[in-house]
Each structure stands twice: as structure tokens, then as C-alpha cells.
Image: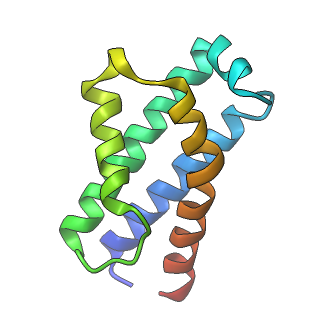
Amino acid sequence: MELKIKKYCFDIKTAIESINEFMININSVNDYQKSRLVKRAVEREIEIIGEAMNQLLKYDSNIQIENARKIINTRNWVIHGYDSVDDKIIWDIIISHLPILYSDVLKILDTN
């Protein structure tokens, strides 16, 4: 595997693992909304995931990751629309979409 592909996938994997650590005592969207520290940490990791995905697609536009473009768009929304970030959408991303992304990245790392 190309070193850059491995680096970007590893960055995404590590960011997701960090989010999972931050969420260890967060059991609901209400818990999430109450913790400014966790929210900011999660948002930062989403920024990292989106930027790593952006760089990955620039390097190899044929990479097989579900919703790659949406991941980049989410990063842009969090950074540039910080005042309109919806906690419920972020919660849904954490619960529903990050496990899929994590699986996709592991497959890439394991196959190359």
C-alpha cells in the first residue's frame, strides 16, 4: 500500500477511536449536548476525519469509502458553519456513520 494512503486511513481510524473514547460516558444525545468539552473534542476529530478523507481522495480518487464526499462536506460544515452545527446530526454521525467508516478504513488497511 502506498504510504500516503496508509497514513490518511490511519489518521481516520485514530480519530474515530478518539471519538469513541470521548463518548465512553455519553449515553444519549442529551448527555452529548450537555458536555461542551466532549462536543468540541468530537467536532475536532470530525474535522480531522474530513481533512484526511479530502487528502486521501486527492491522492487516490478511486478509494472505496462509503459517503467519502459527504464526510468532507461534514468537515466543511463543522469548520465554516460552527454556529449552525446541529448536535443531533453529529450524534447520528457518531452512532450510525462512524462505525461504517471505521470498517471501511480497516478493510483498506488490512488488504494492503
Residue at image location 49% in from the left, 78% down from the top: 108
Q: Position of residue 36 (x, y in %)?
A: 58, 13
Colour scheme shown: rainbow
Please give the name of the residue rendered at 34% of the width and 75% of the height, measured from the top-left corner. Answer: 3
Q: Residue furthest bottom?
A: 111
The quadrant of the picture occupied by the N terminus is bottom left
- Say if 44 sits above or below 69 in the image: above
Instruction: Please indicate whether residue 18 sits to the left or right of residue 2 in the image.
Output: right
**Compared to 85, does 90 lie above or below?**
below
Give residue 39's position: percent from left, percent from top: 56, 22
Instruction: Give 92 or 35, whichever is nearer the viewer.
Output: 92
* Above or below, comparing residue 62 to residue 36 in the picture: below
Residue 73, by quadrant, is top left
- Residue at figure coordinates x 62%, y 51% from the top left: 96
Q: How many marks?
A: 0
Residue 42, given in percent of the width and then of the height, sits at 54, 32
Image location (x, y in percent) of residue 82: 34, 20
Q: Quadrant of residue 47?
A: top left
At a point 34% along the width and 40% down the height, the residue shown is: 75
Residue 57 relative to residue 6: left or right: left
Q: Is residue 24 left or right of residue 54?
A: right
